[in-house]
Image (tube, rainbow, N blue to C red):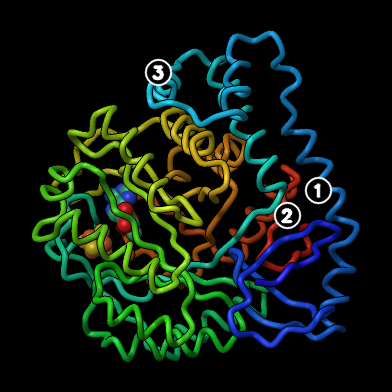
Amino acid sequence: MASVDYFGERRNIIAEDAELNVNDYIFAQGGIFVRKIPEKEALQALESWKEIFFELKAVDEHLSKIEHLEGNSLFALQKVNYQKRLKRDELRSLLHLKKPEELQVLYDVANHVRQKTHSNASCVHGIIEFSNYCRNNCHYCGIRLDRKLPRYRLEKEEIINIAKNAVETWGFKAFVLQSGEDFSYSDEKLAEIVREVRKLGVLVFVSFGSRSKDCYQRCYDAGARAVLLRFESSNEKIFASLRPKTTLKERISLILALKKMGYVLASGFIYGLPGQSEDDILNDLELTKSLQPDMYSFGPLIPSKETPLEHARLASLDEMLKLIALARLNDANANILVTSALETLHPDAQSKALLAGANSMMINLTPLEFRKLYSIYDQRRHEKIQNDVESVTGTLKSLGRAPSDIALGPGF
Ligand code: 5AD
Ligand code: SF4
């Protein structure tokens, strides 16, 4: 372990076998040491942060105050949350809230809890979707095996170039490498890609689906430290019916094995799957919590064209915000991602989610020509990266949030 001073705040991180001395400057992500930073570079970065850091904190603190809730019937909720964990029936009753003014209280409380535990820190990872081939036929997914659409694969060099460009242009410091379950990339090839991206001095998340433990071990040895793998549904029957030839048990056992390997975990589920009951939703939240992920990643089912679920019901924004708030109240310490699926529900979904308990974002770095084909669901954002970076940093700034793993662009 190492203790890091961040503008007067103490944070403990896992230093692994890094050779660190007192007074070294370092970059850490998700509680993990990533690399040392030369003093000059660090001082420059800290200098550019100094002013804005305290300004952002003030905005965030202001927006997270809940004094105005005094006297409201739901104020008790906040007290309950501070003293003990919410019981299942309490979570259930919050799930039933419908009145806009009550929902607003719920979101405000969740935002307050987020602020207390995470201050105004916000992770901003870049995601690179490097292949839309997949051997699976998940009923909800627009790149399932049986869907006819042009397929693409990126070569190692292309992936490295995307990452390198993102580091140089926008200062990205954490990447998610994602693909369908595409076995034309051997375990060694994936590990090699990880090794090369890691050389950029960044945190590497892998998201390759249900590959073998050996594959994930090789990637870990090559420098990957985090994995994004959802369990998709805590209901065994729903899982088995929507993910042919796979079982929930296997999925969970893989997730647990990856945690044991040392991976930091991002996991979660899809909300709105046909047949999902209220109890399933509460179980989804509980199962996510029991896996002790660093980050929750859950989003609404977006019915995709030419898939068995194309006519399924689309969740409303409030249903999703409620779920984010509940996840926050149920697990104050985790990071909660605003998923791209959620962003498709409403133009302001991102900032609404950030004000209902969420605190993490992803920016898609896949080149536009391929992003269109990585159509796990329709209506994905097809913005130029520059526009996305500006819009995300603009949103964060307006809410007083400090992105922890992207440079401060001119917008700041
Ligand atoms: N709507 C929402 N999420 C989806 N995913 C796949 N298809 C859809 C869809 N139609 C999610 C799955 C997978 C992640 C990469 O994308 O949860 O784990
Ligand atoms: Fe493949 Fe993942 Fe889509 Fe399932 S959800 S078909 S595993 S890409």
> Are circles 2 and 1 on residues that touch, CB within 8 Å?
yes
Please tell me how crowded label 2 is: few (under 14), some (14-19), or many (20+) other residues with Cα within 10 Å: many
Q: Is mark 3 within 8 Å of ligand 1?
A: no
Check disc 2 and report the residue beneath it. Answer: 402
Q: What distance separates the C-alpha of mark 1 from that of mark 3?
A: 34 Å
Could you tell me which secondary element the residue under label 2 belongs to?
strand
**Amino acid type of the residue tagged 2 in the rendering:** Ala
For image coordinates 34% across by 45% down, the residue present is 287
Could you tell me which secondary element the residue under label 3 belongs to?
loop
**Amino acid type of the residue tagged 1 in the rendering:** Leu
Q: Earlier in the sequence, mark 2 or mark 1?
A: 1
Q: What distance separates the C-alpha of mark 3 from that of mark 2?
A: 33 Å
Q: State whether residue 377 appears in this view.
A: no
Check disc 3 and report the residue beneath it. Answer: 96
**Amino acid type of the residue tagged 3 in the rendering:** His
Residue 400 pos. (x, y %): 76, 45
Please tell me how crowded label 3 is: few (under 14), some (14-19), or many (20+) other residues with Cα within 10 Å: few
Residue 105, placed above or below residue 259: above
Check disc 1 and report the residue beneath it. Answer: 56
